Amino acid sequence: KKKKKKMKGKKKKKKKMADENIVVAVRVRPFNSREKQRKSNLIIRMNKTQTFVTDPETKKERPYTFDFSFWSHSRDDENYVDNQFVYENIGRKVLESAWGGYNSSLFAYGQTGAGKSYSMVGYGEDIGIIPKACDEIFRRIDDQTTENKKFKVEASMIEIYNEQVRDLFNPGEAKPQGLKVREHPKIGIYVDGLKELQVSSYQEISDLMEKGSQARTVASTNMNATSSRAHTIFAIKLTQTEIERDGGKEIKRDKTSKISLIDLAGSERAGDTGATGDRLKEGCAINKSLSALGNVISALVKQGNAKGKKKKKIFIPYRGSVLTWLMKDSLGGNAKTIMIAAMSPASICYEETLSTLKYANRAKQIKNKAVVNEDKNVKMIRELKAELAKLKKQLATGGPVTEEGGVPGSDPEVEERHKKEMEEMKKKLQESHRFIAALQKSDEERAQETAEAKASLSSNVAASGGGNFQNLFSSGEKMLQNMHADSMFDGRIVFAVREGDMLIGRKTKDSKPDIPLGGVSVQVKHAIVRREGDKIMIVPQESAKTFVNGVAVVKETELKNYDRIIIGQHTYKFVDPQQHNELDEEEKDRLENEIDYMYAQQEFADNQGLSNVVAQTKDDAFEKKMQEMKEKFEREKAAQQQQLAKEREDIEKRRAQMMGQLDKLKTEASNSSNADPALLEKQLAQRQKAAELKFLKEQQKLAERRKKLEEEMKRQEELASKLELKKKKEEEQRAELEQRLLDLIPRVIEANSIAQELEKPFSFRTKLLAYVRDDGRGNQETQTELGVQLVNRKTGRTVMWKMDKFNSRFYIMQEMYQNFIYALDNGEDAPVVEKESDAFWDPESGDAQIIGISMLYLKSLSHLIDLHIWTPIITNKGEKTGEILVGVIPVDDDGKELTNEFVQDPYSLEGKTIAFKIKVEGARGLPLDKCKDSYIKFQMGFIHDEPVKTKVETRKSTFPKYNFNEVYKRTNIKREFIDFLRNSAIKFEVFAKDNNDISTIRRPGTASRPSTAQQFDMAEKNALISQMEALANDTGSAEDMRRAQRQDNMRAMSERMRAADKLGNDSVVGNKKCIVRISPAGMIMLPYKLPDGAPEGSEACIIS
């Protein structure tokens, strides 16, 4: 028995798989044009497997170690790495794993423009990992195919955009909701309806990839998307069949492996602005997939570090997104996986680069369990057939026996449950039939299916602009070529212009235009391109906007070479090879290099008056002033140096004269017989020493003057340098702002068009938002950001959205529109969108908006001095809009406030414990129109990992109470914390919602009633008057003139209110509504003008 147990244990041990870590490589690219233009510094260096990143501000270097660090920054460097080297080191590893029967996966991660697609696909002749791998697969197949070994290759290509899966090999049947991702206990995770096409050569798979990319371009252009917003998965299924012959019988053994090559969307850091906290941000699928991928990686790392039973308890959220669900095998599953992280080397991309390195550093800790995929088809078919027979039997007998012996029909609940079970069984039956049919397909059937799919794909691509630009240009064909912000899609769609009329419009069930365009603002019959010989014209159709060179055309317009055409979100250029070839080389180069997508958008913005939001003007006055300052500085420097040289020369001359006189006296004394030689020598020595001292002092003074001059010169140089740097920074910010504006304008136009077509009462405008940024150390600077203003055309209400929030909502608007258009074009009812899922709906103008910030400096705490003060709330325009009562007070171990514990030297607290209390008591003077549901948020460095939020003041009050009172303790204080207290501050952010229901005080006894939710009844009013009279009679501070004046005002007010009660007519107060603010102390303040939203008939008034 012991022997058997031992053998059993050994067998089990042999079966146990060894975990294998994900292989991680990082690759740095050269500077791009934007980074060169902004004169970015290099912040990355590599040494073998190590990568170092330098913080551009602190100059601190952070080291990271990976399996591979690829330096592709400069081709001139001796350690430069090209695509071939990358492929040989990581691409070939993927292939080797697949050839051994393992599933293998390679995915590229990094910010937009970091070089992911260059590594995966390549550009032009410099092909990337995917085409190189495909080429090598077929070269190996050619070398290794024999009578006893056969190979079969199947390929599929999908794109995941906005959590929707699109089959790029079958674009003709695409639906807005995309393909469904499912899981079957026998098959595993699969995409329902995905075409897997059998290929037999590199050329064949290369053509499919090219057509798939063109299909992707068409779909993405219709949705105004970019490659950076979508994930692409190119999958290759490799089946190796080994044939053994035994006595005339053939025994086939299959080994199947799947190669997944994944190009992820851009991994931009989420900003800390508008979208944060937006109800739809987490639901926005664009952001969802990468954040879900991050969650999966974090959970897998945690699981890898856990031991024993704890490991099993850690949940891996694969179902968090479609992407992570499809990558389940690649991450922690049955696959050998490699990750390549692409990054920018520029200082302006430091945060994104650091984020990418941290992501890659976490990913390298993930462990996968790859196994060889032996033939399972026979067993799977058998099991599926058994399941099929069971399901058929259950359906024939009326389904399974219901719970608790219930009989269908005896109880409505049982009947309903029975119906659901029957439907579920029918679905399972259909699914099993489909799987069996797919698994039993012959090679001939698969080949036929592939041929049909290829023909359909070619037809779809050709109809959607799949012409070859070079071939058409060489043959002199006039054409329309697309322009796109994304280099992956730019110039990929080409329509040859034939003789006669060609209709441009939206493709529907009943309309098949010659140039089909989709998306917002594209009409079914939008425009006609008319060719009459060599003359090409564009004819706009009624109520359809068409722009040529940025100007709206309303009649037939002739097109010239390189004219830009904008229809909806589509931008095309007209190319006439004959006209182009007649140009000189200089003009050809100008057109080819200058006329691009950004040129067309800038031209459109200029002509439509949209680009004057940020006016870039050369500051000639500044340049002139800087030049004058430099010239003056040089003149003064030269004059000072000349003066110093002259003074030095004079000193040396006087010294020489003095020494000559002394020598002369010595000679005379030596020749005199009456002089005492010893005395004379002594006198001469004294005079010489005095002269030397005098000259030394003059030289010291001269040296001091020289030093002061050098210091002054240095200070002047530093000042000039600072001014130049400031100017340069402002120009960079302006250039970046303009670039972002050009990116934003088409989206705002599209959002307005979507709102119009979906009949939403909203419109959008671009706005510049100015912010006063405070770094907590007393340094403030004004920054400008782009925002989008949402206007409710029915109510006139407006709310400002930050860029992040608008972008998140924009992609949901696109999805809403796609679903709407699909239903419209296919004769279906328009989909109903719930209010909570509506991208346009912002309840009560959205969540609470920030109305200002207030700073509380912490230097007092470093001396253990209590600080409890009113600090001003400053808006983003630098204006005061109220005050908050906050405090930071040292306390003892019991939380009791300390008042007499002054510390002269803050650094004497080093190594000790400090406890303190942060108080946020309330606010006063908040804007009357923004005082609803107010609260304060703050975060103190070294103490809070996340911002702390006070309670929400639910009263609509300009004097809210927050009553926040928390004690914090920090032990073993370090010098860094003391430095923080001495130089930093807590930034309090004040938030509130718009207040449209402004409370009023009405005079009782009048017929009219204000239309407000909050009114004072008699008891409340009498109590208020009593408080006012009590305060008016308080003599405790009679010497305080301001208080005395306020008491007089209160007394007069209370008397008038009493008189109004007695008279009950309009003789004293009048039948008017007066808007007032009342402090907790009973102080009444009357505004000199009415705020927005005041009830009809209200007046502002002054009571003397």
Image (spheres, rainbow, N blue to C red):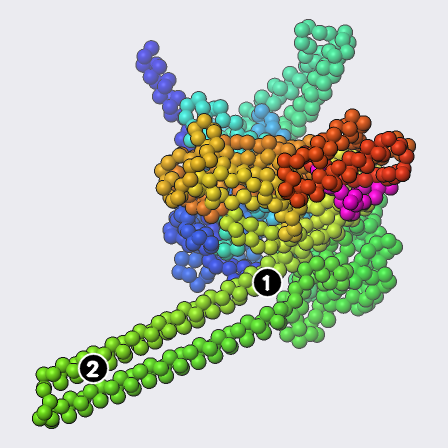
Is residue 1098 found inside the magenta-colored segment of the image? yes
What residue type is disc 1 on? Glu
Report the quarter where the N terminus lies.
top left
Q: Where is residue 479 in the image (x, y as percent from the top left)?
A: 74, 62
Of all residues shown, which one is farthest toward the top?
405
Q: Of residues 912 and 579, which is closer to you in this image?
A: 912
Name which residue lies at 70% across and 70% down.
580
Q: Quadrant of residue 157?
A: top right
Q: Quadrant of residue 499?
A: bottom right
Q: Does the magenta stretch include residue 121?
A: no
Left or right, residue 1025 beside residue 874: right
Report the span colored magenta.
1083-1104
Residue depicted at x 69% and y 36%: 1079
Q: Gap in Å between the C-alphas at discs 1 and 2?
A: 65 Å
Residue 215's spot in the image, x, y percent?
Answer: 68, 48
Helix, strand or loop under label 1: helix
Mark 2 lies on residue: 687
Residue in the picture at 74% in, 12% down = 413
Q: Mark 1 points at which residue?
A: 731
Position of residue 510 measured from the top left corner of the image (x, y, whole percent): 84, 44
Callout 2 amino acid:
Arg
Residue 134 visible in the displayed image: no
Q: Which mark is residue 522?
A: none
